Image (cartoon, rainbow, N blue to C red):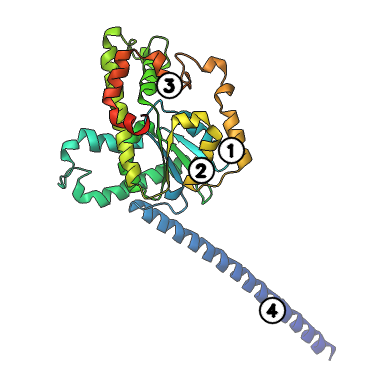
């Protein structure tokens, strides 16, 4: 009898062990299934993302088109100063001179301008395939921006693109990214040309760069041609940017350097309000103070430096009457519209 009782107890313990083993196995199986399901979902999402990228689409985890803020215009208009201030705000990142506008704009408007309007299948930017290559430009810009500045991804982050020397392509970039935001930054063309002349003269900051490439300073006999070329180039860049600005359906704001210099806080407030980007008022004042002309070290500003005068109307002292006349003839429509 005792033998049968022991056998019964032994069988019961074995049953309990088996039940526990089965419960543990079920739990482990459930955890494994959950892990496999999670991994499957992750792989599926990644596969879709890769497929979308290969097809020329956008990275859903990358920078959003509506959070791209272009600064278009031309060189020597204050774009370095403006982008430096905007890049200081929380959640803002500045992309300085990617020249993506030059990449497409120079090809479309200069190198192959005789092909504009032709729909042949061979020209890469042929009008018959405009919808296709605009999608490619869009994907290219967003993908490269996201690769370089992943911290700018997210609904509350902004990528500020300083693109004065790529402004020739502003109409194409605006059309490819219609949700993006745009700043058209202009300056009196006479001050722009005066600043360019100063940079190219001996001891100027551009002369130092060009001297390393074996290019000498501006000769007196070449000044007239240089002034005319700079004025025409400025007018061309602003004309293209203005074309993009007028056609752009997204949020946009036109800013004159002179008003930015005269009342920086109020102008910055207007920029952000018009672009519908929320910034902290205290932070705005701190950013403006940090980047004020007075707080630039003396050794970094003055004649021949990148930060030269910051004095609107200084062209009256810097340009000869003949050079002022050349600039005014080349940029008359712009002067009449904004500086009459």
Does residue 301 sit above or below 335 in this rendering? above
Q: Nearer the viewer, mark 2 or mark 4?
A: 2
Circle 1 SS class: helix
Q: Disc 2 versus disc 4: distance between alpha carbons?
A: 67 Å
Q: Disc 1 versus disc 4: distance between alpha carbons?
A: 67 Å
Q: How many residues crowd around disc 4 within 10 Å: few (fewer than 14), some, or many (20 or more)? A: few
List the residue tagged with mark 4: 19
List the residue tagged with mark 2: 272
Extreme-bottom residue of the structure: 1
| Quadrant hosting residue 220 | top left
Extreme-top residue of the structure: 220
Along the polypeptide, which appears first: circle 2 or circle 4? 4
The tag on residue 284 is 1
Does residue 133 sit above or below 162 in this rendering? below
Q: Nearer the viewer, mark 1 or mark 4?
A: 1
Location of residue 196 in the rendering, given as x and y in whole percent from the top left corner: 37, 19
Is disc 3 in contact with disc 2, using a CB cutoff of under 8 Å?
A: no
Q: How many residues crowd around disc 1 within 10 Å: few (fewer than 14), some, or many (20 or more)? A: many
Q: How many residues crowd around disc 3 within 10 Å: few (fewer than 14), some, or many (20 or more)? A: few
Circle 4 SS class: helix
Q: Nearer the viewer, residue 229 or 314?
A: 314
Circle 3 SS class: loop
List the residue tagged with mark 3: 313
Along the polypeptide, which appears first: circle 1 or circle 2? 2
Is disc 2 in contact with disc 4, using a CB cutoff of under 8 Å?
A: no
Q: Nearer the viewer, residue 224 or 130?
A: 224
Location of residue 236 in the rendering, given as x and y in whole percent from the top left corner: 28, 31
């Amino acid at each position: 009898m005792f033998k049968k009782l022991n056998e019964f107890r032994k069988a019961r313990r074995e049953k309990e062990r088996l039940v526990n083993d089965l419960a543990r196995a079920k739990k482990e199986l459930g955890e494994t299934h959950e892990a496999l399901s999670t991994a499957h979902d992750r792989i599926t999402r990644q596969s879709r993302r890769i497929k979308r990228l290969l097809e020329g689409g956008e990275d859903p985890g990358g920078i959003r088109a509506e959070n791209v803020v272009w600064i278009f215009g031309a060189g020597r208009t204050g774009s370095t100063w403006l982008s430096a201030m905007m890049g200081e705000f929380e959640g803002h990142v500045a992309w300085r001179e990617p020249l993506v506008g030059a990449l497409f704009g120079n090809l479309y408007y200069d190198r192959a301008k005789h092909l504009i309007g032709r729909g042949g299948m061979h020209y890469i930017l042929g009008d018959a395939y405009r919808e296709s290559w605009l999608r490619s430009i869009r994907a290219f810009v967003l993908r490269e921006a996201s690769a370089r500045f992943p911290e700018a991804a997210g609904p509350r982050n902004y990528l500020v693109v300083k693109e004065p020397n790529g402004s020739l392509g502003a109409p194409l970039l605006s059309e490819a990214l219609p949700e993006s935001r745009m700043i058209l930054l202009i300056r009196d063309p006479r001050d722009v040309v005066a600043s360019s002349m100063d940079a190219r003269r001996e001891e100027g900051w551009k002369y130092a760069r060009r001297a390393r490439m074996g290019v000498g300073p501006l000769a007196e006999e070449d000044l007239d041609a240089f002034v005319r070329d700079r004025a025409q180039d400025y007018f061309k860049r602003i004309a293209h940017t203005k074309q993009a600005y007028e056609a752009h359906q997204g949020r946009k704001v036109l800013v004159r350097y002179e008003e930015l210099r005269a009342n920086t806080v109020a102008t910055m407030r207007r920029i952000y309000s018009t672009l519908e980007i929320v910034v902290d008022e205290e932070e705005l004042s701190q950013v403006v103070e940090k980047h004020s002309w007075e707080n630039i070290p003396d050794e970094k500003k003055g004649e021949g430096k990148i930060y030269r005068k910051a004095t609107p109307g200084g062209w009256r002292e810097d340009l000869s009457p003949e050079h002022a006349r050349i600039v005014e003839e080349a940029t008359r429509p712009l002067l009449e519209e904004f500086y009459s």
